[in-house]
Amino acid sequence: MNHGVLRIAGLAVVTFVGVPAIAETVPVDAEFCIECVQVRVGPPVVVRGPFPDELDAPFTALRLADGSFRGFSANGSTYAIEGASLLDLDGPRREVLRAGNSGQESECGRWLTSAVRSGNAVLGFVHQESICDYGPQGQTDKTMAIATSSDDGLTWIDLGTVISGRDSPRPGTTSGEGDCTMIDGTDGYLYAYCLRNSDWQTIVARARASEPAVWHKFYQGSWNEPGLDGEATAIGFLGPGAGYLQQHDRVATVTNDPWFGGVRLSFSADKVSFVDLEEPLIAVDGSDWNRPADTDLIAYVTILNPETGSNAVNDRFLLSYVYVPPGKGFENRYLVHHEVALSIETAPVPVQSSLALTRWADPTQEAYLASSGPLTGERLGYRQDSIVAYLMTRAPDGAASVKVAECSRDWSGQLGHQLAEDDGCGNGYVRQRTAGWLYRDEQPGTVPVYRCISETRQSHFASSKPDCERLGVMEFRLGYGFAP
């Protein structure tokens, strides 16, 4: 296994051993109606991949003066990639940060996790690792550094290490504090949300925007502990992926939480006390970092502004993550973005989160399929045809529902894909992932979802019309989803 694979695998061995601890702070946000939040997650767009030696950190980006974008992907080294938009970054890469010298805190590599504009410069938050003994019985130590760039991230000046843990490196463990993302809190401070390796909890630190190399951690109600080796209060299992909701003046964090059932979205008005949306943005079956595995993997989740590339977002933003398909190892890593629409309704809503069930078309074979997840491998050439409906990301309360699975098969090199009620793949198909949930019976604002088949191509797909829009014939109705 290469360095990137072992670093990720080592993280997973410890991360998902037990149930996350309860946060030491009590979430309070009386002014925010969390039950009134409604989120729609659009179709996945595969932006980059597959890569064996890239995509090992939260993705960050900058909009350039000419309107194009520069994204940063890291795995030991950090690479810059340019494109016309955040959905079009599949071009060549150039190395902009590399590992330090032997004995330095960055001797294993430097991963840029956040890029924040500050005046005429860019501030970069840089994950560092030392003691490169990767593997189940090995060890590594994590820290964070701050860097600055005057040419939009092509060259960087290191301002030094600013966050480190109190635990000492020892064989067989991952130590330190890292994997942080940095946001501008719009109150004169920069905030960093980090993973503490000793207990796998999220901690938070801040620095004055005017003094970005001097950080203090939040501990027992104050910001007095030093960023280097200081104490820190655990604020929960929130993940380090953070952004700022400008219209609502709140920090948002996103993390893949297998105990929660998927990608969890949390909000905070005071930067430290968080409340959770009760429904996942995306349902997941597992988070197995020991690859290959039967389930897919969503990792390094974060949010991005499609207009600026930053993590200061409006109600329409991008959900970004690294994706590994079912049955694949870390040599098959993809960068995936979804367009997300968030709204605050005037009263609590019965279903808060929904995910697009998309019909995709292969123009070379006139074949179709329907999925709520990313299409990878041989299906990278498929193009979005339409959104059939929006699926729920968990079973609804007070109404009968259908859990829908995605199933696949490979007969003599002929790939097949179909939707089925959970545990009902059949006919040589193997369950791949949970697509989402449909209502069993019609509800207000819903449309029927039919499973269809193209008899000429023997490909299954979905439609909201009983005639399958003349693309095939209807087999049966799966249930009812929200109208696009």
Image (cartoon, grey):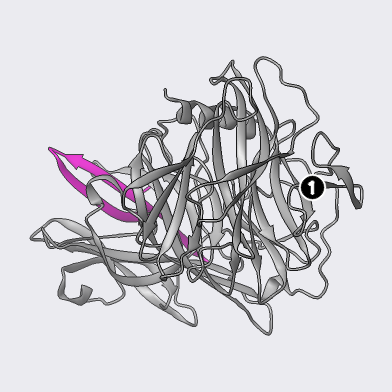
Q: Classify residue 166 as left or right of residue 260.
A: right
Residue topped by disc 1: 215
Where the C terminus falls, by quadrant?
bottom left
Q: Position of residue 259 (x, y in %)?
A: 63, 45
Quadrant in the picture for residue 186? bottom right
SS at mark 1? Answer: loop
Secondary structure, magenta segment, majority class: strand
Q: Position of residue 206 (x, y in %)?
A: 78, 52
Q: Residue furthest left?
A: 456
- For image coordinates 72% across by 21% down, the residue present is 169
Q: Is residue 306 above or below residue 214?
A: below
12 within the magenta span: no
Asked if one can make out residue 426 in the rendered structure from this viewpoint, the answer is no
- For image coordinates 24% across by 41% down, the residue present is 428
410 within the magenta span: yes
Viewer-proximal residue, 381 or 59?
Answer: 59
- For image coordinates 73% across by 55% down, the residue present is 191
Where the N terminus falls, by quadrant?
top left
Q: Position of residue 104 (x, y in %)?
A: 63, 25
Q: Classify residue 201 as left or right of residue 108.
A: right
- For image coordinates 54% across by 21% down, the residue present is 134
Quadrant in the picture for residue 26? bottom right
Viewer-proximal residue, 457 or 43?
Answer: 43
Asked if one can make out residue 138 in the rendered structure from this viewpoint, the answer is yes
Q: Position of residue 236 (x, y in %)?
A: 75, 47
Q: Is residue 203 above or below residue 86?
A: above
The region drawn magenta spans 399-425
Viewer-proximal residue, 11 or 158?
Answer: 158
